[in-house]
Amino acid sequence: MWKKNIFLGFILVAIISVYYGCKKHEVPIIINSAPKYQEKYVDLEKLFSIDVTEINLFTKRNDYYGCYAFDSKNNLYILDTYEGIITVYDENGNFVRSFGGKGQGPNEFYNATFMLIKKDKIYVYQGLYEIKVLTLEGELIKRYQVSLYIENPLRPKVVGDKFYLLKGRTDRTFTKLELVLSSELNEKFSGGKDIWRYKYPHGLPGYPCWEWLMVLDTGEFFFPEDNHNKYLITKYDKLGRPILKFGRKYKKEKYSKEAIERFYSIYKKSIENGKIKVFDEPPIVRAMFQDLRKNIWVVFGETYEDNMHPDFENSVDIFSEKGEWLYSFKTKKISKNIFYNNGKIYKVSPLNVENYEQFIDVYEIKYLLD
């Protein structure tokens, strides 16, 4: 009899452990119905514009990730992946210097893919297997071969003394797509571990979902997994474990006529042969960044880059780090092609097709309420 009681006791303990273990790992979900602030919560003050007309980076590609970086003094470095030139601007947008060029010399680059700055050293990945490390003035420190191979896409991030890398893996038919995030990589982009995987339901022909990932300097990261259907963002810790899901009630709206017509005019052949899929509605989350207050800014829905309508205003939400919806507004000052550094938002304007000019407009965030 006593053996039976002991056995039942073990079963009960196991059930309780499983119950509390599951309960302990439940991820909080916050779905907001209305923003906390209805009156104007923030203002965006324009500081200056940077003329990037002569930088081929901005005229030859749509994804600017990995082609800009900041040093410890908030100087902006822009890599022209076509000409192999790095241009430097100070924190006030003034030109400082440029260096490099197309070639295979010590201070030149060929087929450069991305640039990073870690501890005030520039890392440029070029060709298929090489990284060059340079001083901030452009002098070569060392070069070495890496085991990294090109996957589509390839997005790096400096986190402390290590690197993070987002890779896109597809199959032989180039239809499937799995995103893989690796952490704690050394300078040869090895020795790390895969902490997160995501199989994109629409595959490689679908929307470029790698643009939705935001990795913080702490190693925590955010991603909207069901971004075509729900306004829900998952926050992960640096080990890749989900720790929070937040978003808000959202009514999907179809792309405008201008956006659809533009897609078909630009990508007609790719659409017809199945390389690109056109959706009726835009993805919900288009871009994210975290500001100095640790608030999360989200650009959502159709953006100016979709329709190129001069009067179009983009939609922006602001959430607290705990997932509380703080404020929502429309603006021309923020769009999909933005990046953030030290309280400033850098908005990359599309190329002006009439005069071929292009600028980066820089805005400072001003909080009006607290």
Image (cartoon, rainbow, N blue to C red):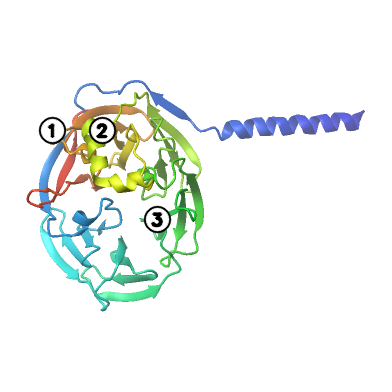
Residue at 10 percent across and 52 percent down: it is 357
Q: Which numbered disc flags the more N-terminal residue, 3 or 1? A: 3
* Residue 20, horizontal then vertical, whole percent: 63, 31
Check disc 1: other Cα within 10 Å, few if <14, some if 14-19, many if 20+: few
Left or right: where 368 falls relative to 269? left
For label 1, the residue is: 311
Nearer the observer: mark 2 or 3; the answer is 3
* Mark found first going from the N terminus, 2 or 3: 3
| Amino acid type at image mark 3 | Asn
Front in this rendered view, residue 160 or 81: 81
Q: Give the quarter of the image for residue 72.
A: bottom left
Q: Amino acid at mark 1?
A: Asp
User: Which residue is labeled 2 in the image?
Assistant: 316
| Mark 3 nearby-residue class (10 Å; few <14, some 14–19, many ≥20) | some
Residue at image mark 3 = 152
Residue 122 lies, with reference to residue 27, above or below; the image says: below
Instruction: Measure how far apart labels 2 and 3 are at the Cα level.
Output: 29 Å
